[in-house]
Amino acid sequence: MKKLIITPNEIQEIDLTANEIKQAENNDIDFALILEQEEIKKAQEKARKESAIAKLKALGLTEEEVKSIL
């Protein structure tokens, strides 16, 4: 892996050290976990909303009434 160092006078391409490579890999893993957690939260929120809508309809509310509540 390489990194670019850009200055007004030049662009340098430098090899990453073993520590920098390890940190980049750890960052990638952390980012993937964060994305996964966000997707889980979105799915849970969607499921809760669908459940709430179904319960409101089961109580006899019309589609328009449910939409006006949400």
Image (cartoon, helix red, strand yellow):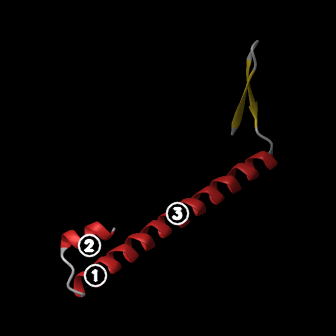
The residue sitting at 32% across, 75% down in the picture is 50
Q: Is residue 59 left or right of residue 19?
A: left
Looking at this view, is 39 or 48 the one in front? 48
Which of disc 2 and disc 3 is earlier in sequence?
3
Eyeballing the image, is 47 above or below 68?
A: below
Residue tagged by mark 2? 66
Which amino acid type corresponds to the residue marked 1 in the rendered image? Leu
Cα separation between marks 3 and 1: 27 Å
Residue tagged by mark 1? 56
Q: Is residue 18 left or right of residue 45?
A: right
Q: Which mark is residue 38?
A: 3
Eyeballing the image, is 1 above or below 10?
A: below
Looking at this view, is 15 or 50 the one in front? 50
Give the number of the mark in front: 3 or 1: 1
Q: Which mark is residue 1?
A: none
The quarter of the image holding the N terminus is: top right
Which amino acid type corresponds to the residue marked 2 in the rendered image? Val
Instruction: Name the secondary structure under disc 3.
Output: helix
